[in-house]
Image: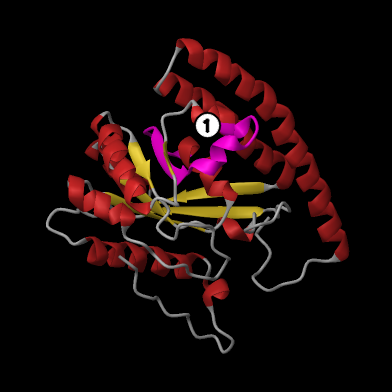
Amino acid sequence: MAALAFGARPSVLQTLWWRLRSVVFIVWMAVTVVPWALAVLVFSIFKQGDPVYWMCVGWLRTAIWGARVICGVRHRMLGLENLDAAHRAGAVIVLPKHQSTWETFAFPCLMPHPLAYVFKRELLSVPFFGWAMARMDMIHIDRSKRANAWNRVAEQGRKHMAKGTWVIMFPEGTRIERGEQGTYKAGGTRLAVDTGTSVMPIAVTSAACWPRKSLMLRPGVVDVSIGPLISAVGRQPAELMQQVQTWIEGEMRRLDPTAYAGQHGEEKNISTPQS
């Protein structure tokens, strides 16, 4: 089943059915995350690093499976040749579009390397989910201390990439409404330029099925389009991020054109990223 067309109103029965399925899905996640998180906490006493990471990814696969089976949210991968090239390249910084919780759960399941997310440390206090996340080797930052936050990203990012982990940063910083564009910040490309690491842009249409700030999932297909690797050698962070943004936003308009059309059918403009 295709996702509901942008701007279309679901029927009352559709809405009730989607809400019921979404409640079942939320219960499914809650029921499965508690024992899984407790198992991770115990396991992490004896093992650290990749074994803990892949154990946590096991639950993420369970969540994505639940979204597909219970709520009808499927996904389609595009640009797999670019993912193969990135796999061969080794260290990569992943810079995706961010519309939904879906890609936060899905990317560790879809990427061939472990991922180190850069995220706000407040998430570590979420019961069970955050406790398990704290046992994973991620990059959590205090956003109130911006200078220290960047130093931590740079230090931890280098450490992760040296052992083959891919660093993933959402350039827009937060989830963006379907058909909208956030402000692209050049933190990810700054790290890429500082370390000479290539970046991989990703476009994802997840908001069509799991909208921002919503617990009601809608059946449909999430397109995940992997962009070509972009070298950071000899580049400036702002102009490199401009290239990343241009690719992502252009691909988003190709994948979900009606969401990006203005009132008279014009495409919304692509803005300039912030450094």
Let me know if residue 221 is in the magenta part: no
Q: Quadrant of residue 162?
A: top left
Rendered location of residue 99, percent (x, y)? 54, 58
Q: Is 235 on the left-hand or right-hand side of 99?
A: left
Rendered location of residue 34, percent (x, y)? 68, 26
| Residue range highlighted in magenta | 110-130
Rendered location of residue 232, percent (x, y)? 19, 54
Q: Is any part of residue 57 visible from this angle?
A: no
Q: What colouring style does the render use?
A: secondary structure
* Count of numbered circles on the image: 1
Let me know if residue 113 is in the magenta part: yes
Residue closest to the far left: 234
Which residue type does callout 1 highlight? Met
Residue closest to the far front: 145
Residue closest to the far top: 46
Rendered location of residue 93, percent (x, y)? 31, 46
For the point 47% across and 10% down, the residue is: 46
Q: Is 69 on the left-hand or right-hand side of 250?
A: right
Q: Is the residue 206 above or below the residue 131 in the image? A: below
Q: Is 114 on the left-hand or right-hand side of 160?
A: right
Q: Quadrant of the N terminus?
A: bottom right
For the point 47% across and 80% down, the residue is: 268
Q: Secondary structure at mark 1?
A: helix
Q: Is 198 on the left-hand or right-hand side of 209?
A: left
Residue annotated with mark 1? 133
Q: Is any part of residue 33 visible from this angle?
A: yes
Question: How many residues crowd mark 1 within 10 Å: few (<14), some (14–19), many (20+)?
Answer: many
For the point 65% across and 33% down, the residue is: 127
- The one nearer the camera, 72 or 162, is 162
- The one nearer the camera, 45 or 32, is 45
Q: Is the residue 166 above or below the residue 48 in the image? A: below
For the point 46% across and 65% down, the residue is: 252
